[in-house]
Image: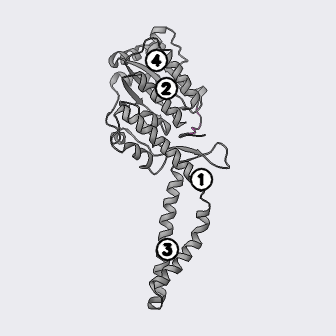
């Protein structure tokens, strides 16, 4: 990759938007948030605004909030550009943006938390899984109960009162589902609910400061999608955020030069990128290896939420 191309394209965007241009392609964890804070502190001449090219599979909700608040406290206007992967805690982060730029292949995920599976090493489940499981159990148990009542009345007619049929149906339904319900840990259920509330709390604070989310958007991001893997494209994002647009031509050119470094998220900090691109010309030390065209090909661990 030609370092001078990066400098030229970056300065074009930086000058038009009066912004520091930052590339962030990292998993989100407390160590990364500390490094990001230190990096912002090291910028000698900050612009009024920030243009952040952002790619992540997610990570820790607390760290995502800290990074987002760092930006909100330092910049008047924050534009976050999504050109590829941005999921989970990354979606929490983008609530800080006053404007979203999303390319045709840019994609957000629901504001979900990922929780460690018990008795499994390195495996996680969606924080929405337990809630969805309970809803399905409720639906299935009710349908079973109604089926028992209907079948009993059809079989015995007037010989069996409705009350007796319902009592028998209750016993049958309880016998079928009680073992399933016994496997639900109320403490774990409360923990899951608390993690979702934390994500909601942070999302509302960031949304209030940015003024870019529509009413009930945080709640919809938390609960309005059936799966952690659901994709939110630019059109869908327009139903959640007030200011969403495709990239301008100079932004397209910068993304083209950056290549996969701006689009394909990595899941390990030592593989990631955290570069203030608008500093490269001032420092005169742009390194072609600093913004690689290709990231290591690894199976992503889309981590989101709180504790890992």
Alpha-carbon distance for marks 4 and 1? Answer: 46 Å
Which sits earlier in the primary sequence, circle 3 or circle 2? 2
The mark closer to the camera, 3 or 2, is: 3
The mark closer to the camera, 3 or 1, is: 1
User: Does residue 300 show up magenta in the picture?
Assistant: yes
Which sits earlier in the primary sequence, circle 4 or circle 1? 1
- Report whether 261 appears left or right of 214: right
Query: Disc count in the image?
Result: 4
User: Does residue 248 show up magenta in the picture?
Assistant: no
Residue 236, picture quadrant: top left
SS at mark 2 in the image: strand
* Chain part drawn in magenta: 297-302
Q: Name the residue tied to disc 2.
A: 24
Q: What label does residue 145 carry, if any?
A: 3
The mark closer to the camera, 4 or 1, is: 1
SS at mark 3 in the image: helix
SS at mark 4 in the image: helix
């Amino acid at each position: 990759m030609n370092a001078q191309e990066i400098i030229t394209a970056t300065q074009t965007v930086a000058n038009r938007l009066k912004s520091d241009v930052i590339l962030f392609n990292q998993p989100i964890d407390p160590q990364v948030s500390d490094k990001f804070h230190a990096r912002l502190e090291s910028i000698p001449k900050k612009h009024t605004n920030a243009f952040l090219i952002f790619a992540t599979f997610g990570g820790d909700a607390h760290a995502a909030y800290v990074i987002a608040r760092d930006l909100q406290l330092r910049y008047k206007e924050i534009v976050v550009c999504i050109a590829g992967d941005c999921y989970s805690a990354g979606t929490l982060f983008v609530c800080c943006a006053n404007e979203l730029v999303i390319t045709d292949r840019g994609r957000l995920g629901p504001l979900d938390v990922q929780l460690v599976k018990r008795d499994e090493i390195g495996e996680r489940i969606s924080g929405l899984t337990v809630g969805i499981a309970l809803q399905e159990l409720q639906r299935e148990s009710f349908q079973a109960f109604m089926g028992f009542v209907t079948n009993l009345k059809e079989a015995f007619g007037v010989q069996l009162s409705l009350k007796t049929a319902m009592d028998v149906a209750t016993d049958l339904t309880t016998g079928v589902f009680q073992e399933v319900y016994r496997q639900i840990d109320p403490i774990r259920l409360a923990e899951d609910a608390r993690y979702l509330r934390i994500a909601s709390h942070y999302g509302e604070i960031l949304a209030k400061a940015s003024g870019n989310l529509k009413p009930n958007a945080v709640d919809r991001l938390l609960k309005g999608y059936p799966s952690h893997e659901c994709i939110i494209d630019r059109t869908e994002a327009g139903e959640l955020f007030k200011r969403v647009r495709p990239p301008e031509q100079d932004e397209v050119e910068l993304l083209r030069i950056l290549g996969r470094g701006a689009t394909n998220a990595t899941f390990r900090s030592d593989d990631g990128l955290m570069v203030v691109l608008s500093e490269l010309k001032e420092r005169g030390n742009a390194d072609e290896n600093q913004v690689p065209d290709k990231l290591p090909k690894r199976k992503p661990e889309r981590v989101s939420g709180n504790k890992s």
